[in-house]
Structures are given as structure tokens and as C-alpha cells.
Amino acid sequence: MSRSHNTKRLQATKAAKSWQDDWRDTQGGFNPDVFVGVDDVTRQRLLDYQIGPPVHMGSKLNARNAWQVGHWSDGGNYGFHSNPKVNESIYGDIYHHGTNRGSVQNAVWEMGLPNIETPEHLTQFLDRTDALTAKHGNFLEDGWDPKDILLYREAPQQAVAAADPVVDTPVETTVDVPEVVEQEPVPKEPIEGVDYMTPEMQDTYDRIQDYNSGFSAEDWIAKTSESDRDKQEHAQKLADKYKFEIAENLQPDPQSVVNALTTAIPHKLGVYS
């Protein structure tokens, strides 16, 4: 084997295994640990969908593939030989599986996962691939094409039944109106004290009428509202009358005066200066 052939093979081998070291820095990068110890069902799903390295620890190994454990390149060549045509003829589908890493990583990124870091992430990615296969058939039959990668943008959801189209025709609204049933009026017995007076009430009413007979509120108000001037004039007339009568009664009797003087000065009558 020539030195040139060995150099190319070593370069290809190094490129095919570099993803295991820089997966954290790659959009959609795969943690190599998620492929360690997978069960047989998961291993078969990975092979069917061409996800991950075609050969990894736990796979059935032989002299032809033992040295290719973990090889998963982003395009280029895959296999022992430096001639891609030879490798493709030898490895068949595995050849394409070993060179599709970039496309699978793009699908992970389109799905919304930054990386496949845990086994749970890997299962989620495989479940999405199952759902797309159920909806679109074997969409990976011709490999990981750009149109297949874009399908991973679809959000997984349950089928929703199509809603009935909205009709603009107004719908008449009916309102239930309770039927009015006319009823015959029920005769009402008069109630004593409400509809007619009791004997005590009638007696009280009659006595009030007797008490008010001959009494006029209007006349009483008019009489009590006479002006003070009339009262003063009446009082003044009475005062003048009694003063005159008193004055008359106080005047001395002329004869009494003469008798008094005669008694005081016998036989002397006259006026003294």
C-alpha cells in the first residue's frame, strides 16, 4: 500500500471520528455516549434511519468493519479504500450512512434540539422520525435530502378535526315566553279594623266629631290675631274712666270744710293772709 494511500486513509479516519470530540460545539451534535449500550430495538432503528455511526461498540464486528467503529463523517469518503467508488460498491447503504452526519445534525437542529446529549434526546429524535415515516412513508429511502430535513420542523401534534365553516347567515334566536294563565279573582272577606272600623274605633271617631262641633279654627286664629293697638285703646279708656271717678270721690264736701274751720276758730270766719 502506498504512502499516499495511507495518508489519505488516516486523514479520512481522523475526519470521520472528529465528531466525538467537538459535538458540544456543533449545532445538533451527538454525544457519543448515547450510542453506548443501546438495546437491540434501538440499534435496529438507528440502522434503518441511518442515524449515528454505522458501526459502534456492541455491533457485530468482523474483519471488514472492526476498525470502522465510531466512524461517521460529514460527506466525503467512507471505508477502507481511498477510492469512493470502490467503497460505495463494497459497503452499499452503509457507505451513505457513514457520510450523512451533517445532514442528521441539521435535522436535529431543525427539530429544535441544540444537541443530542442524553439517551432521552436520542429517543425523542427517533420518535419524531417514526412519526414522519408514518405520515410521509419511507421519506429517507433516497437518503437524507434537504427536503427530508425540513420535515423535522413540523410540530408533532394530534390530528385535529376540521371545524365546520362559519356561516354568516344570521340565526333567529327564539326566546321561550312563559304562557300567562288567567285566574279567577278570589273574593276577599272584609277585615275588621282594616276594611271597616271596630266599635271602639267608631266611638272614638264620634267623640272627636262632638268635640269639634262649634269650634272654628279660622275664627280662633282671627280673634287671637287682633292688633295690640285695639287692646291698648280699650285699656286707656278704662284707665281714664277710673281716674276721673277717683278724682271726683276725693273732692271735699264744702259744708264739711266750713264746719271744720268753725270748730277750729270759733266765731271767726274769714280768709287769713
Image (spheres, rainbow, N blue to C red):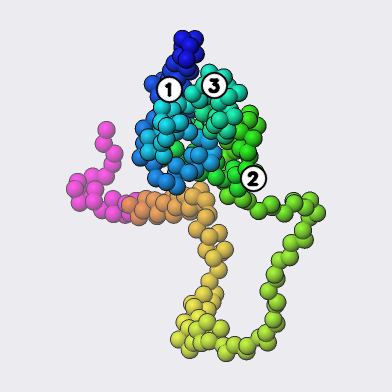
Contact (Cβ within 8 Å) of mark 1 with mark 3: no
- Left or right of 22? Residue 262 is left
Res. 21 image quadrant: top left
What element does badge 3 sit on? loop
| Residue 259 is a magenta residue | yes
One can see residue 121 in this view: no
User: What residue lies at 64% left-to-right and 35% top-to-bottom?
Assistant: 142
* Stretch of the chain drawn in magenta: 251-273
| Residue 142 is a magenta residue | no
Label 1 or label 2, whichever lies nearer to me, is 1
For mark 2, what is the residue?
A: 137
User: What residue lies at 44% left-to-right and 44% top-to-bottom?
Assistant: 42
Given the image, on which type of amino acid does mark 2 rest? Gly
Q: Quadrant of the C terminus?
A: top left
Using a 10 Å C-alpha cutoff, classify the residue at mark 2 as few (fewer than 14 neighbours), some (14 to 19) or many (20 or more). Answer: few
CA separation, marks 1 and 3? 13 Å
Using a 10 Å C-alpha cutoff, classify the residue at mark 1 as few (fewer than 14 neighbours), some (14 to 19) or many (20 or more). Answer: some
- Left or right of 245? Residue 73 is right
Label 1 or label 3, whichever lies nearer to me, is 3
Label 2 or label 3, whichever lies nearer to me, is 3
Residue 186 placement (x, y as % from top left): 63, 88
For mark 1, what is the residue?
A: 17
Above or below: residue 118 compared with residue 11: below
For mark 3, what is the residue?
A: 77
